[in-house]
Image: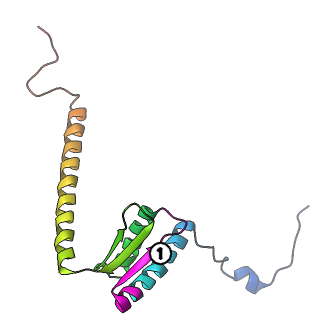
Amino acid sequence: MAVITPISREELLRARNAKQPGPRTLRRQSLDADAVAVIRAVNETGAAAIDALGEAPRRYVAGLRGALARAGKEEILVRRKGRTNRIIAWQMRPEDKVIQEQRRAWGAELAARFWGQRRKRERTRISGGRRKGRSSRTG
């Protein structure tokens, strides 16, 4: 026999309960809040020191850079200090801009080399590994 429970029409037609944000959304929101704090500190004093607690420093730096880019503050540089867990952020200076451009060019060159080699390997794999002009027949 079925169990029938009386329920009001308003409760029945109400939209489903709002779901809780997932871990990725929570991390992004936390990084966005940290980015706002970094922007405020950099605007007030010119630099900010950050201690990444509970998260790998490289991962935190990458996330914080993304949060700063979402906030439209790409002129704020974020670097990890040596091999420590200390992270620093500061307003980009003219000499930093030159270094940044050199790094981007170097990264683009490395990416082009990597992807060029990868395409070459894929072409070889697709063609069966044989070079042009050679037949598989012997004799």
Q: Residue furthest right?
A: 1
Q: Which residue is mark 1?
A: 31
Task: Give SS at disc 1.
Answer: helix
Residue 124 at what x, y percent from top left? 20, 34
The reply to whether the magenta stretch includes residue 49 is: yes
Whether residue 27 is situated above or below residue 42 in the rendered picture: above
Question: Which residues, given as a range, are shown in magenta?
Answer: 41-56
Who is closer to the viewer here, 109 or 17?
A: 109
Residue 54 at what x, y percent from top left? 55, 66
Residue kind at label 1, given as amino acid type: Leu
Whether residue 15 sits left or right of residue 127 in the image: it is right
Residue for point 43% across, 84% down:
36
The reply to whether the magenta stretch includes residue 37 is: no
Q: Answer few, some or many: residues within 10 Å of disc 1's Cα (few below 14, many 20 plus, some between 14 and 19).
A: many
Task: State which quadrant residue 98 falls in.
Answer: bottom left
Residue 23 at what x, y percent from top left? 56, 67
Residue for point 22% across, 49% down:
115
Colour scheme in the image?
rainbow
Whether residue 76 sits left or right of residue 2 in the image: it is left
Residue 21 at what x, y percent from top left? 58, 72
